[in-house]
Image (cartoon, rainbow, N blue to C red):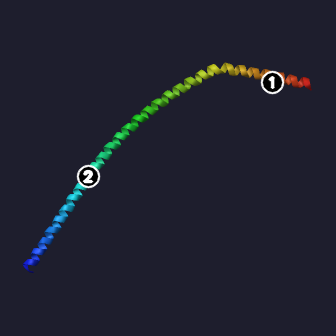
Amino acid sequence: MSNTDFVDIMAQLEAKEKELQEKEEEAMREAYEHIELTEANQAQAEARKKELQALLANLQEFDSEFDELDKELDDKLSTMLLPDIEGLEGNVDEEVARSEQLLTASL
């Protein structure tokens, strides 16, 4: 092997070593970027989870308030409308009786 061959081989080895070092550095940069993105995504997911938990708590509170108002409305409607309904039932009974009398009289 001549000195020229040896110098060429050494130059090729140095070029490959430099290429591998650059690839290793790029891989490390990408790994750090991935870690940073993962941490950022995790932080965003935690923040979103807290927002959703707060919304759920508000929704549950609203649901409870709605149930209370619905019950109050049902109570008020039943106390307000019950006498009217009973009165209408009485009127219907009277009309049925009168219709039966008219029908019987016409036969």
Q: In the rendered view, does 40 fall on the left or right side of 8? A: right
Q: Residues within 10 Å of mark 2 (few under 14, many from 20)?
A: few
Q: Earlier in the sequence, mark 1 or mark 2?
A: 2
Residue corresponding to mark 2: 33
Vertical relation: 100 (above or below) 3: above
Instruction: Please rate how many residues cluster around mark 1, counting C-alpha atoms within 10 Å: few if below 14, some from 14 to 19, many from 20.
Output: few
Q: Amino acid at mark 2?
A: Glu
Distance CA(mark 1)–CA(mark 2): 86 Å
* SS class, disc 2: helix
Which residue appears farthest toward the left when viewing the image?
3
Amino acid type at mark 1: Val
**Residue 79 image offset from top left, x and y in percent:** 62, 19
**Residue where numbered disc 1 is placed:** 96
Say which residue appears at 20% left-offset and 60% top-offset: 24
Q: Position of residue 27 (x, y in %)?
A: 23, 58
Direction right: furthest residue: 107
Residue at horizontal 32 percent and vertical 45 percent from the top: 42
In the rendered view, would you say 62 is above or below 2? above
Observer-side mark, 1 or 2, equals 2
Which mark is drawn over residue 87?
A: none
Locate residue 90 relative to residue 43 in the image: left or right. Answer: right
Please tell me which residue is depicted at 18% across the width and 62% down the height of the picture: 21
Q: Which percent across, then down, holds residue 62? A: 47, 30
